[in-house]
Amino acid sequence: MPEFSIGEHDFLLDGRPFRVLSGALHYFRVHPDQWADRIDKARRMGLNTVETYVAWNAHAPGPGAFDLTGGLDLGRFLRLVAEAGMYAIVRPGPYICAEWDNGGLPAWLLRDPAVGVRRAEPRYLAAVRDYLDRVYSVVAPLQVRHGGPVILVQVENEYGAFGSDKTYLEALAEHARAAGITVPLTTVDQAVDGMLAAGGLDGLHRTASFGSRAAERLAALRRHQPTGPLMCAEFWVGWFDHWGAHHHTTPVAEAAAELDALLAAGASVNVYVFHGGTNFGFTSGANDKGVYQPTVTSYDYDAPLDEAGRPTAKYHAFREVIARYHDVPGEPPPPAPPAPAFGVPLGDAVPLLDAPGRWSAGVRHDALPSLDEVAGAPRLALFTTRVDVDGPAVLCFGEVRDHASVFLDGQPVGTLRREHRQRALGLRRAVGELAVLVEDHGRVNYGPRLGEPKGLVGGATLGGVALTGWEVRPVDAPPAPWGDAEPVPAGGPVAGPVLLRARFSPPEPADLHLDTRGWGRGVVWVNGFCLGRYWSRGPQRTLYVPGPVLRAGGDEIAVLELDAMTDPTARFVPGPLLGHTEA
Ligand code: GLA
């Protein structure tokens, strides 16, 4: 069996120089029935390697749980890479950043503030070791020397941007070795001297992340990695989007010229990302550099393969660049036909505040809990309590993370948004049932806010007096499907929070693009599969529906609208609408 190693100047596959031409493809962002298709398209662009992170919190919804099935079957994903004749790079973190909720760290682990974050703190390290054991038991037998595809394993992720605890990095490296990882271990850091110095460890091969100015960045990397191959382990060819901002694109010619510069310099590369996929469900992360900025549902990233797995102009340009240096296989994939366009009226409206019991039984909490303190740690929950102040009063929360809609006896009385640092609301008269619909819009995935609690944090007061006696209901999963009766269309505009449904059958089996224009803010499920969040503030307008989620005998869509819908129709359009760009 071959060995993969690091020589004086090159990566060596069985002793021969090997240039890594890799593309990032996160299995946890792509429907598992589409993995083989995306991998094949990576090969046909001229790549020889597929790279993936491992998202700890996706595999481990709670302490002791670890799921390696279905869309989380990492072993199957890696075997498909091998079947395509390609190699694999695995980046198990434990922290991955990646615009992924909490940078991949399980929120349940960090609930105890005594647990350290990304440092050699015993409780944190014990959990990390347990996690890595599970991952490496899949990865170790799939290394090249055992006939598998895995040639490199990365330790941590851009650690130099966060800390400088070398004992921590050493513990991660030692643990990988103890778990039977024999391929070279790498680190990645932004191509800045301070970060490369803090994030690297002797004995681990240093790589850099950047998207432009290749010569300058490779020179910085060389100062810290004096021998061996130069690798841009994250060549950023696009970027991610935040709600309320523009859709990011990078000019094709510029991205192709940067790739050309990297290859001309003899460097190895991992295109970040080759195919981004989707932050399905409640998996998207957020940034916060003073202002909280939640990441959108699409992870299209303006990548060579778009969110629906279709080759873009960037794909063809990159293939041409790679062909200048290496053989690329036969023909590129043919263009995909447009998705079917059709619409169905949404109906059978179930207002949440009228029938909260349809969602879940309420649980009593005397003091106001954060979302993390509620059983199941929901991402969306309804909090109710009785209030009785017969006159004006100010309702005040410690902090709102990230969005609270407030109702008094079913009437909307205001909204509090984290981005605006809002935490108080004046009421003319506060008598009746107070209901607060609380939304977590994604955990910060970069910087010091990892692991922060979500929801209403720090208690609630009304007129300066603590509010107690709360009933809390998770509403982040739709109530059980209704019976056989045909849904009654809503007809006109609908005020949320409300659940709407429809049945539909696409004219042919295909991926779909659900148009959310005319809707406010909410969450969509198709046949129980959560497509993710939508929001009228954009930039993203359509939600991607992977074809394999659809069923031959007819489909069901459920929409939880939290704001208001002007047009309660589920309209499917021929292609994605990711919103306005900067120019
Ligand atoms: C860094 C991280 C990645 C990702 C990119 C931006 O390079 O390592 O996980 O967050 O930034 O997309």
Image: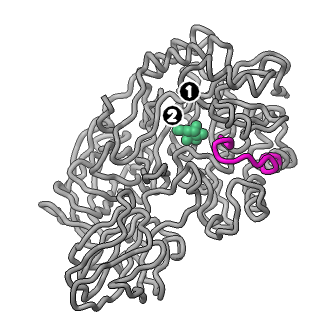
Using residue 164 as the reference point, say whether residue 158 is left or right of it: left
Q: Amino acid at mark 1?
A: Ala
438 up-or-down from 447: above or below: below
| Location of mark 2 (residue) | 275
Mark 2 and 1 residues: CB-CB less than 8 Å, in contact? yes
Q: Is residue 462 visible?
A: yes
Q: Position of residue 286 (x, y in %)?
A: 48, 51
Of residues 198 and 433, which is closer to you in this image? 198
Residue holding disc 1: 42
Q: Which quadrant holds residue 1?
A: top right
Res 124 quadrant in image: bottom right
Query: In the structure shown, which secondary structural element does the residue marked by tag 2 occupy?
Result: strand
From the top left corner, tell me how far across and down residue 309 is, in percent: 45, 33
- Please name the residue shown 44% across and 73% down the image: 398
Is 221 left, or right, of 552 in this rendering? right
Q: Which residues are magenta?
A: 158-170
